[in-house]
Amino acid sequence: MRCGCPRCDAYMVHAESMRLGCVCPECGARCDACLGTNTVMNRAAFQAMKAANKAQNEREDTPPPRER
């Protein structure tokens, strides 16, 4: 994973250590934003989100009704 450093705009690199995240080689800043929110979704919540996304995409792909 490569992220931009929020302090000095250098590329951060993934740090392989006990503390997961990225470290900036320029200023030493650490970040774990790219790892997500540290939460786990259950299967039912994921399936509901997937169905809602599919329904939204179908609504966006449907042309508007013709005027008479």
Image (cartoon, rainbow, N blue to C red):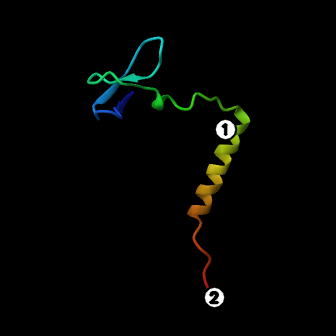
The relative height of residue 48 versus residue 68 in the rendered view (above or below) is above
Viewer-side label of 2, 1: 1
User: Would you say 13 lies left or right of 45 here?
Assistant: left
Q: Quadrant of residue 31?
A: top left
Find residue 46 and name its label.
1
Q: Position of residue 38 (x, y in %)?
A: 58, 27
Q: Secondary structure at mark 2?
A: loop
Image quarter of the C terminus:
bottom right
User: Would you say 33 lies left or right of 49 here?
Assistant: left
Q: Secondary structure at mark 1?
A: helix
Q: Position of residue 12 (x, y in %)?
A: 33, 27
Image quarter of the N terminus:
top left
Task: Decide which of 53, 25 is in the foreground and name it.
Answer: 25
Q: Which residue is mark 2?
A: 68
Type of amino acid at the residue the image marks with label 1: Phe
**Label 2 crowd bin: few (<14), some (14–19), many (20+), radius 10 Å:** few
Q: Position of residue 29 (x, y in %)?
A: 36, 24
Task: Decide which of 32, 45 is in the foreground and name it.
Answer: 32
Task: Decide which of 54, 19 is in the foreground and name it.
Answer: 19
Could you tell me which residue is drawn at 60 percent across and 81 percent down? 66
Type of amino acid at the residue the image marks with label 2: Arg
**Label 1 crowd bin: few (<14), some (14–19), many (20+), radius 10 Å:** few
- What whole-number distance in Å separates the C-alpha atoms at marks 2 and 1? 41 Å
Q: Quadrant of residue 65?
A: bottom right
Q: Earlier in the sequence, mark 2 or mark 1?
A: 1
Could you tell me which residue is drawn at 44 percent across and 22 percent down? 21
The relative height of residue 63 versus residue 54 in the rendered view (above or below) is below
Q: Are marks 2 and 1 in contact (CB under 8 Å)?
A: no
The relative height of residue 53 versus residue 16 in the rendered view (above or below) is below
